[in-house]
Structure formats: C-alpha cells, structure tokens
Image (cartoon, rainbow, N blue to C red):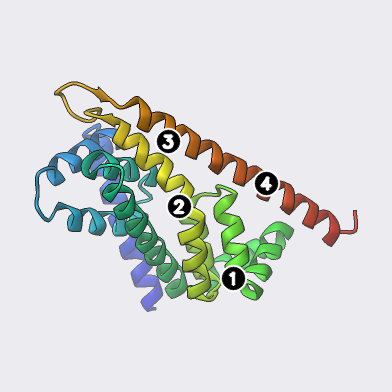
Amino acid sequence: MNRVLAGLAWLFVFIIFWWYTSTREITTVELTRRVIGFLSGNPIGFLFYIGLYMIRPIFIFPATLITMAAGYLYGPLFGIILAIIASNLSSMIAFFIGKFFGSQMIENFFKYDLVKRYSTRLRENSFETSLILRFLFLPYDLVSYFSGFLKINWRGFLLATILGSIPGTISFGLIGSAFEGEFSSSGNIFDFNLFILSVLMFFISIALSRWFKIREMKRLFVENDI
C-alpha cells in the first residue's frame, strides 16, 4: 500500500511539473537558464545546485544540461568536480527509489532475453555490469532505476557509476565552461581551448562506448555459442 501511495505521489508531482512547464511554454533550455539565474552569484548556490541535481531524476530532467550548467557557473575545475558529485548522488536517489518500489515493476519484462540476461548479470556481478551499462551510454536514469529495482549491491553500483560517468561529465562540463555566456543575454564568450578539450573527452567517451559494445557483442556470441 505504501508503494502504491508513493508511486501515485511521484506521478502527481511529475504531471504537475510538466503541465506547468508545458502550459507556460517553458522549454528545458529556458528552465536551465532560470536555474542558472537563481544560482548565479549566490554564495551557497553550489549547495542548491547539488540539491536540484539530486531531485532531477524524479522529473526525468536531462542531466546533460544540468552538467553543462555546472561548468558555466563554477568553471572547468570546480564545476566538473561538483557535477560529478551531484550526478552520482542523483543516481543513488534513483537507485534507492527503484529499490523502494522493488523488482515487481520489471517482472513483466523478464520475457525479453536481453533484460533477463542483464538482470542476472547485475545481480551476480554488480560492479562490472553497471560499469558496462554506463559506458554503453544507455539512459542514465533508466540504468539507475533498473539497478534499484533489482536490488543489486549499491556499493558496486555507486563505484561503477562514478567511474563510468567521469568521461561524459568532464566533456559536458567543459562544454558549459567553453560557452560561457550562452545562457545569458550579455553576449557569448567562447573559450576555444576548453571546447577542443571537451570534444577530445567526448571522443574518448565514444571510443570507450564502442570498445565496450564490441566486447559485449563478442561475449553474447560466446554465451549463445554463435
């Protein structure tokens, strides 16, 4: 009964949020701009940033924009560190929400071989499988919720999420730092060096993703004796 009430409350908050933004034609970029305006110049804004990032999975708000906002607000060093901390805390929020609701929510999906395979692997080897899923660039919140549903080892999940999210977080954080002024009306300041570095990190992320995909395909062939 508690799960049903919590699920209804979650659904209610989600609907109200998206109804409010859609009826007022507030896009995700515009909402990000408002958040930046609220945080900018606030001496404890970084604490609000972490709090906002932590509740982001509840509203399924794009993590990339919030990560870029950290680079824009706090620079390439502190901003990226802050984004890494906040993103991993948000993943744990999604994980424990999934754990609260339990695995009953995905039992119907076990008929799909791919879901069943990764469910088994997550339970047997939480760290390695979670790391693979992060490097495969699967939807960030979906992996967190799914892992929570399965009630896998949270320590392995957290460590894999920290390691697996670093390249992408650095890349998008650097983009936010490079395009300083992009979210304001005072004109744009473009840091070409940071942009090049962000592109390099992005390609590193893509290369890791490709390597893990090839590795996974080979593993699937072996498991299925192909």
Q: Nearer the viewer, residue 162 or 147?
A: 162
**Mark carried by residue 166:** 2
3D distance between C-alphas at marks 4 and 1: 20 Å
3D distance between C-alphas at marks 3 and 2: 12 Å
Under circle 2, the secondary element is helix
Q: 17 above or below 2?
A: above
Residue at far front of view: 193
* Precedes in sequence: disc 3 or disc 4: 3
- The residue beneath circle 4 is 211
- The residue beneath circle 3 is 198
Three-letter amino acid code at the position of disc 3 = Ser
Q: Nearer the viewer, residue 72 or 49?
A: 72
**Tag 3 and tag 1, C-beta contact below 8 Å:** no
Under circle 3, the secondary element is helix
For the N terminus, the quadrant is bottom left
Report whether 182 appears left or right of 65: left
Report whether 181 appears left or right of 222: left
* Precedes in sequence: disc 4 or disc 2: 2
Three-letter amino acid code at the position of disc 1 = Ser
Q: 33 above or below 166?
A: above
3D distance between C-alphas at marks 3 and 1: 30 Å
* Precedes in sequence: disc 3 or disc 1: 1
Three-letter amino acid code at the position of disc 2 = Ile
Crowding around mark 2 (Cα neighbors within 10 Å: few <14, some 14 to 19, many 20+) is many
3D distance between C-alphas at marks 4 and 2: 16 Å
Residue 190: % across, % down:
29, 24
Report whether 223 appears left or right of 105: right
The answer to whether one can see residue 12 in this image is: no
- The residue beneath circle 1 is 126
Three-letter amino acid code at the position of disc 4 = Trp
Q: Residue at coordinates 34% horizontally, 45% vertically from top-left?
A: 67
